[in-house]
Amino acid sequence: MPQKYSIEVIPTPPRHTPIGKFEIERGADCINCGRCAIVCIYEVHKRQEEDLRCMAEPVVYRCKGCFSCIQECPRATLTIREGTDYSRLGDSYWTPEIISKNWYQAETGKIPVSGAGYRGPFSGEGFDSMWTDMSEIVRPTRDGIHGREYISTTVEIGRKLPAIKFDSHGEIVSHIPPTINVPLPIIFDTLPFGAAKHIDQTLLTFDKNVYKAMAMAASYLGTFMIVDAREGFMEAGQKAKGERLEARGEKRQCIPYISQPTLHGCDADWINACKMVELEYEEDVMSVVNEVKTLNPGTTISVRVPFGDNVAGIVEELTYAGIEVIHLYADLNGKAVNQTRKKSLLIPDMTHKVHRHLVDLKIRDDVTLIVSGGIAMAEHVAKAIICGADLTAIDLPLLFALECRYCKDCQEDLACPVELKEVNPEWGAQRIINLIGAWRNQLLEILGAMGLREVRRLRGEVGRAIFVEEIEKDTFDTVFAREVSHDAND
């Protein structure tokens, strides 16, 4: 049996005080009884280290709003209210809750919980219109999903193995296509802003530190990161030397990304050395594919295709042309990049449409589908795979792990409030490792609750999800049809 894959998380405190959802005031009537510290399981309340007789100021960003301290305070001296800065975080898609939960996971490596329970909406658009069905589980294991019953999160990138043929001597005569094993269905995408926008000949310290942190984390996790193939960017993506972070080997975990329809200006040495290269889709992309294959015949080619009106047709064309991997990407909010219709195309629907199209053509296993754009939480990884993806690529959550507040000041050439250029690469790498460790544990929880022992079996299993639109259609269309029928009879 192969060695069990695991991610060791180490609590890594933030450099700056995170913005908490609540503000807590301790009134002058406090008698320092410590009752609030006893009942708070989130360590919001503690005694002062320099004087244990007195209570310290509440660590407000840890507060989950369970109100236990308020209820138990004998003098009713604690006051709690929602913070004003918290509501200004992010936007309608990357909500304050999503950002703060990613901060928490990057700090602790733990699955976030809420002391007050879930009080948000149970449906919305995109991934929020899906509910994962956990009813398939027959029995829980005696020692939990992290015990002896191993659940594999490994996926293969490349063309899947066909039926193997043997000759009369028992030798394999079938062509075995090359594949790349990744121990979890998550790779790191190019960054959408900030570091990714500085294209100077000499990279800023910000770029180098962020990319080194990503590369160190990718190396430890055994996954890959997509990096701009232009001179300088690949150098910034090189894995810095570390101690514990070197445990999984010295392999280069970079995927050079070529955005222009030519190799001019790209780092040929990196392209020749890497296992996989990604190209932006153009009408003559196959000419660039041939150039890359000439440099490195054994490399796996990925073509980056934007979600849009004709995405299924483009994927079909590329698959028949022999492309092993297609990276389908949406915008930051999980919507189509190129579309003409008024109603926005959303990533779950588009992914499922492409997957079903390939299945109908009987060529689904001829290509690996990577999906990115709007992957904000661990549940989005599982839901994207249910819709037909093989694996996902994430971007913004990596910056959240480094304390990014999604203020977008860097897009306006303003100073970063958390000074990302000062990030220590080893500190940043551990924060990313913690985040991915928490995400993987949530994926294991989902797979375990479905009775699955490997994530590959989840691909395209829409029967393991409940879609709000289908439920509403089945429930209300019949009711409204009856009303229309009665009105017609009247």
Image (spheres, helix red, strand yellow):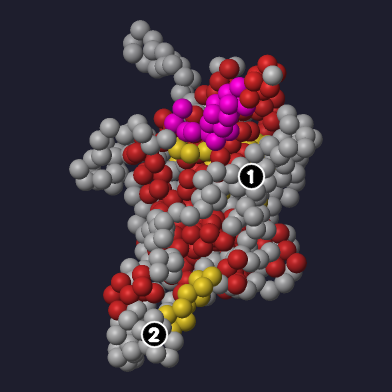
Q: Mark 2 points at which residue?
A: 56
Left or right of 186, for residue 334: right
Amino acid type at circle 2 is Ala
Label 2 crowding class (10 Å Cα cut-off): few <14, some 14-19, many 20+?
some
Quadrant (top left, top right, bottom left, bottom right) of the N terminus:
top left
Question: At 41% across and 56% down in the image, what residue appears?
Answer: 117
Q: Where is residue 184 in the image (x, y as percent from the top left)?
A: 43, 43
Task: Please give the label number shown on residue 219.
Answer: none
Q: Name the residue under label 1.
A: 334
Question: At 51% across and 45% down in the image, what residue appears?
Answer: 122
Instruction: Return the residue found at the far front.
Output: 490
**Residue 203 shows up from this direction:** no
SS type, badge 2: loop
Is tag 1's residue or tag 2's residue first in the polypeptide sequence?
2
SS type, badge 1: loop
Q: Where is residue 362 in the image (x, y as percent from the top left)?
A: 55, 17
**Residue 395 shows up from this direction:** yes
Give the magenta-colored segment's residue range: 463-482
Was residue 159 drawn as part of the magenta stretch in this picture? no
